[in-house]
Image (cartoon, rainbow, N blue to C red):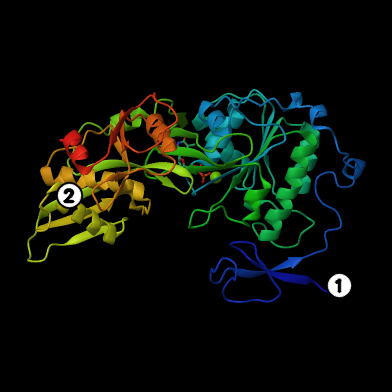
Amino acid sequence: MAKVKTTFFCQNCGAQYAKWQGQCNSCKEWNTIAEEVVQKAEKTGWKAETPTAKRVAKPQRIQEIDTTRDARLNTKNNELNRVLGGGLVPGSLTLLGGQPGIGKSTLMLQIALMLPYKTLYVSGEESAQQIKMRAERINAEAENCFILTETKTQNIFKQIEAIEPDIVIIDSIQTLHSDYIESGAGSILQIRETTTELIKFAKETATPVILIGHITKDGNIAGPKILEHMVDTVLQFEGDRNHVYRILRAHKNRFGSTNELGIYEMQGSGLREVSNPSEILISKNDEELSGTAIAATLEGMRPLMIEIQALVSTAVYGTPQRSATGYNAKRLNMILAVLEKRAGFRLGAKDVFLNITGGISVDDTAIDLAVVAAILSSNEDIAVAKDICFAAEIGLAGEIRPVTRVEQRILEAEKLGFGTIMISKYCKIPKNNYGINIVKVAKMNDVVEWLF
Ligand code: TYD
Ligand code: MG
């Protein structure tokens, strides 16, 4: 028997090692390195035996490349279309990631059921009966949706050749395995191999493929980082599992912008598109509470609206307490000092508690102004109107400083249905008229005056 060749791979980032070690040198995670069997891949995946694979590509003049066959496929789901940049591009690979139970399978099945094209939904996670039960809940009628419960890519390709679908959905990439690789499903090598086979299939037949992907506990897509490089589009489905709203965003999009977001509501009968997001805000709007303010922040490249809560009360003990959850405590002290010195608020003898709701922690300085608004609102016991949001940094002189990518924040606030956004006077914005009222402030006093 031939000797089995094995190599060690970090299951987090995909780095390769000759022998086992406790910590990965490249991503610094502990205990992520595992042994995987590597076999020489004599042939790979999609129609590897047929002569098409041997076809040699020739250079083409760019004017001569035909783009007419690349008209986008309408997914009949406006939110998804927008996030994709106008629909699915033929031959593209889209990866949809998200927490378990967030609704990835539901969203994809719903799309498969609504599409007027022939779709193949391949599931390695659920049985055909379970999928049928889910489809009955969603209550959509489909004539052209095929379900296949299979995890071996070679068999999947055989079925694809038989029914020639227009769109292929794979739930999920971590359950697939290819015969050409020996390690188990979900391992780095298998993910890399099966994705390569699917890319080859997608590009050769111009069929769009959507992959569902699991994510790790810190929110990255499970598998090698290279997976995100290999696919054309990476979508993330987010939201609190206990809440009904879900947000779909593009992290990477070769065919469109990554600034768009889609909003859905999880209902008993599947996901409903929320085309007017302000309805989310209005639903929570019945009571105006003092001490809360909304900040338009960016998490990495993505805009995000967060709620800041502050509680200012007279100190019970001699030394007032200052506590911040999700926000830098030193920065809170600095802001309190600025408020004391530059705006004349006597906060020195008061306890101040600050909390960013949802348990997230933010280090974007653009939330400073919302922190100020929340503190002042709690101190004065006057609520900040619910449809205002804030995006500016506070300087030591009490000046309101501009922040990066302000237009993206404005557009996000507009999209989410806010009526007013307060930014620094010194921000440069390319347009004058947005669908949202823009208030520009320069000094702390302007803020106080405008708010109360
Ligand atoms: P699912 O799509 O299985 O999540 P994922 O594939 O991301 O792991 O979603 C499962 C959740 O959605 C489950 O908790 C039940 C809920 N759900 C509804 O509320 N309504 C529905 O119509 C369906 C199909 C699911
Ligand atoms: Mg699922």
Q: CA distance from mark 2 to mark 1?
A: 78 Å
Residue 224, above or below 75 = below
Q: What is the secondary structure assignment of the residue under circle 2?
A: helix
Image spot of residue 265 (x, y percent):
42, 33
**Residue 54 position by quadrant:** top right
Q: Residue at x 29, y 40 (%)?
A: 294
For disc 1, the marked residue is: 2
Instruction: Answer above or below: position of 335 versus 448.
Output: below
Q: Amino acid at mark 1?
A: Ala
Reading the image, the residue beneath label 2 is: 342
Count of marks, rendered view:
2
- Amino acid type at circle 2 is Arg
Q: Position of residue 292 (x, y in %)?
A: 23, 43
Few, some or many residues within 10 Å of mark 1 (<14, 14–19, 20+): few
Could you tell me which residue is drawn at 48 percent across and 35 percent down?
261
For marks 2 and 1, the one nearer the N-term is 1
Left or right of 362 on screen, residue 215: right
Q: Which one is in front, 92 or 367? A: 367
Dividing the picture into quarters, in which one does residue 21 lie?
A: bottom right
Nearest the camera: 223 or 70? 70
Taking the spot 31% from the left edge, 55% from the top edge, the residue there is: 327
Q: Is mark 1 within 8 Å of ligand 2?
A: no
Secondary structure at badge 1 equals loop
